[in-house]
Image: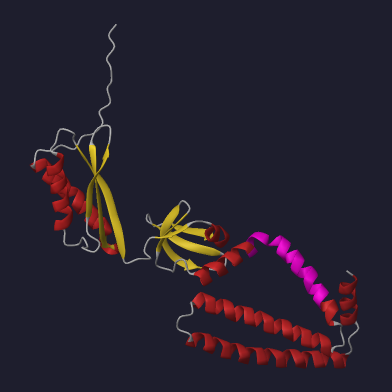
Amino acid sequence: MESVNAVLSKLTGLSVASLVRLLCTVVAGIVVIKLLMRAVRRATARIGSLNPAVSSLICKLIHGVLYFLLILVCTQGLGLEVTSLVALFSVFGLAVSLALQDSLANVAGGIFLLLAKPFAPGDFIEVGDTSGTAVSIGFVHTVINTVDNRRVFLPNGFVSKSRIINVTAEPTRKLEFTVPVSYRCDLAAAHALIDRVARADERVLRDPEPFVKVWNFAPTAVEVLVRVAVRRADLADVRSDLLLAVKQVLDEAGMSIPFARPDAPLIRN
């Protein structure tokens, strides 16, 4: 507190000449900072692989550092002790950090997301219970558009600490579903029919090969697991078409897809 009072007492006792020197120093410093920042922006713009948000962050940090140095230069020119000014900034910084603790955590999370790049705008991601298309990564919030076209703002601190699933990171996806087959059916024939359907679709990739195996003996049916690789854009259409085709070939072969039937006992008085 004594350091703060010392700085304030120095400022109130300045002469007109000192104020003129201070003004000239500030004006010259601002001009130099603008020229330096113009050069920094041009340099970061030449780096094609640099994320625009990261470039903006770098410029803002350098901008803040340059103004802090300008303040130190002005302080020394007026004969003030730098240690007193540092103490003043320390007290102010402590107060701000305590008041904005959550916001600073979100800013730190935003910096982590921009540097680690677990996803980019346009990717379909899952964060906690929220899934949708990433719109932007800001310094405080990550903006996501959900499938039903709702815009969600997630704090970066929460996003950086959560499990992030990037659905669109890879060009291909694995499509997987099970087909229940009645215990009364010819299991080998049913397996062959399902395998033929999986391989007949031209959108199903051949590397890796389609995987069709008898997988489980469930209480009401034998489950056949189907796992194929498709291009990411074809996932929904291929899934729907394969399910329809499997149902059609099983019906044509007289093979039923069983389902659980609850028994409701009738009690008569």
**How many tags in the picture?**
0
Q: Is residue 185 above or below residue 242?
A: above
**In magenta segment, residue 243:** no
Q: Residue at 81%, 93% (x, y): give it.
A: 21
4 sits to left or right of 208? right
Quarter of the figure with residue 19: bottom right
197 left or right of 59? Answer: left
> Residue 80 location in percent, x, y?
86, 84
Q: Determine the image quadrant of residue 167.
A: bottom left
Q: Is residue 89 covered in magenta? A: yes
The x and y percentages for residue 92 are 77, 69
Q: Residue at x 72, y 81 (%)?
A: 68
For the N terminus, the quadrant is: bottom right
x, y (%) of residue 54? Answer: 53, 76
**Quadrant occupied by the C terminus:** top left
What secondary structure is the magenta-colored segment mainly? Answer: helix
In the rendered structure, the answer to whether residue 143 lies left or right of residue 192 reads right
Residues in magenta? Answer: 86-104
**What color scheme is it?**
secondary structure
Q: Residue furthest top?
A: 269
Question: What residue is at 21 percent from the left and 60 percent from the top?
Answer: 204
Q: Judge by depth and name the residue closer to the eye, 43 or 166.
A: 166
Q: Position of residue 47 (x, y in %)?
A: 48, 85
Is 249 left, or right, of 269 in this rendering? left
Identified at 16% across, 45% down, the residue is 191
